């Protein structure tokens, strides 16, 4: 698999690297990292990492803008994207000469002349490190930094269960090989605006926790404005409330006045929550789901449902 991917990279002079919309460090790190690696190995090739610019993750590097004329006869490599409709900047993959998919999500759309999909890999950045070290591709320090940041971000600093001995071995080889000053990269990844920290403090103080281990916080438009954040980033703070002894399931309700909805972000340390969220115009993974509600009345029903879910789980 990796050898045949290398062969195609060697064969094509024009290469486009794409990833999912709403880019995260793994998507940016794998495309920008692979661009540098291919250019370092084959300096004459034209290689572009495309997709919308991300101001939040600008430290990951610059993305390229190219015209659609370039696509013909080019090799397209789609990274970190399980479904065709979420590829950023490409409407039809048929416009390309050859397509390779490299991904670690459970498969949604089966596409690509070559498809390397493995959901036991921690990140696509891990897969690119692996690809590079098992072929004649040549790593660079800049690429190593991007790949390291993407991997660390997707594993939440080696915390998630799909961090494996292979992850550790590849990262160790990467650091030895390129001498990246990896501890200096954490500031970019983890520095947050004061407004967000203040809101988190508010949430910690005001979160309601039931006897059944269900925790929630209602963030009205007024509160969101007071803390000078936005409904999307306030909802993302849900990730900072795991590992609380008394809490099994926790949820943020963020009022979005512009779209006239209540955004729901839900997480769990046990009960399976996506089935419940599906009844409320939402869904997602077993332990990590979201939804969009019409109003706070619907919120009250969801609170009752999730509290019952925690109660039933505890009885088991
Ligand atoms: Mn990823």
Image (cartoon, rainbow, N blue to C red):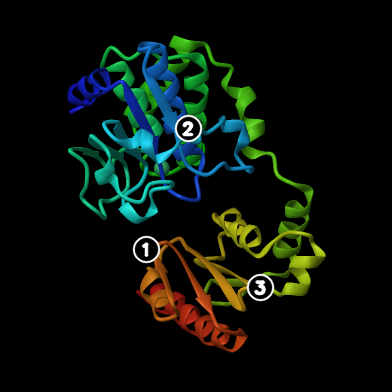
Task: State how far apart marks 3 and 1 are (Cα).
Answer: 29 Å
Q: Nearer the viewer, mark 3 or mark 2?
A: 3
Q: Secondary structure at mark 3?
A: loop
- The residue positioned 54% from the left and 86% from the top of the image is 298
Residue 259, x across and y down, in percent:
61, 74
Residue 78, x across and y down, in percent:
33, 39
Q: Secondary structure at mark 2?
A: helix
Residue 128 is left or right of residue 73, and the answer is: right
Q: Does the rendering let one see residue 300?
A: yes
Q: Does the rendering let one see residue 217?
A: no
Task: State how far apart marks 3 and 2 are (Cα).
Answer: 32 Å
Q: Is residue 76 above or below residue 129?
A: below
- State the residue position of label 1: 286
For the residue pair 302 and 27, the one nearer the viewer reads as 27
Q: Tag on residue 258?
A: 3
First in sequence: mark 3 or mark 1? Answer: 3
For the residue pair 98 and 190, the one nearer the viewer reads as 98
Q: Secondary structure at mark 1?
A: loop
- The residue positioned 62% from the left and 36% from the top of the image is 58
């Amino acid at each position: 698999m990796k050898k045949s991917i290398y062969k195609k990279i060697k064969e094509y002079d024009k290469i486009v690297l794409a990833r999912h919309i709403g880019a995260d460090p793994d998507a940016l790190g794998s495309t920008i990292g692979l661009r540098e690696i291919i250019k370092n190995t084959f300096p004459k090739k034209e290689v572009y990492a495309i997709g919308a610019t991300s101001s939040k993750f600008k430290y990951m590097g610059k993305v390229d803008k190219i015209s659609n004329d370039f696509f013909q006869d080019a090799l397209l490599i789609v990274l970190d994207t399980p479904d065709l409709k979420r590829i950023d900047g490409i409407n039809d993959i048929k416009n390309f000469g050859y397509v390779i998919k490299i991904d670690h999500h459970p498969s949604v759309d089966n596409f690509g002349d070559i498809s390397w999909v493995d959901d036991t890999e921690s990140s696509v950045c891990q897969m690119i490190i692996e690809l590079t070290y098992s072929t004649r591709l040549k790593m660079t320090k800049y690429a190593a930094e991007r790949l390291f940041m993407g991997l660390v971000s997707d594993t939440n600093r080696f915390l998630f269960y799909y961090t494996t001995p292979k992850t550790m071995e590849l990262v160790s080889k990467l650091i030895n090989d390129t001498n990246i000053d990896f501890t200096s990269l954490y500031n970019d990844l983890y520095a947050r605006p004061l407004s967000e920290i203040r809101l988190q403090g508010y949430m910690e103080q005001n979160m309601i926790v039931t006897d059944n281990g269900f925790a929630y916080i209602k963030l009205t438009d007024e509160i969101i404005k007071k803390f000078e954040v936005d409904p999307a980033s306030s909802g993302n703070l849900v990730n900072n409330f795991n590992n609380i002894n008394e809490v099994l399931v926790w949820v943020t309700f963020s009022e979005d006045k512009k779209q006239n909805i209540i955004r729901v972000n839900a997480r769990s340390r046990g009960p399976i929550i996506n089935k419940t969220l599906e009844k409320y115009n939402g869904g997602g993974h077993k332990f990590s789901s979201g939804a969009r509600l019409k109003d706070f009345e619907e919120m009250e029903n969801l609170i009752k449902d999730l509290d019952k879910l925690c109660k039933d789980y505890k009885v088991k």
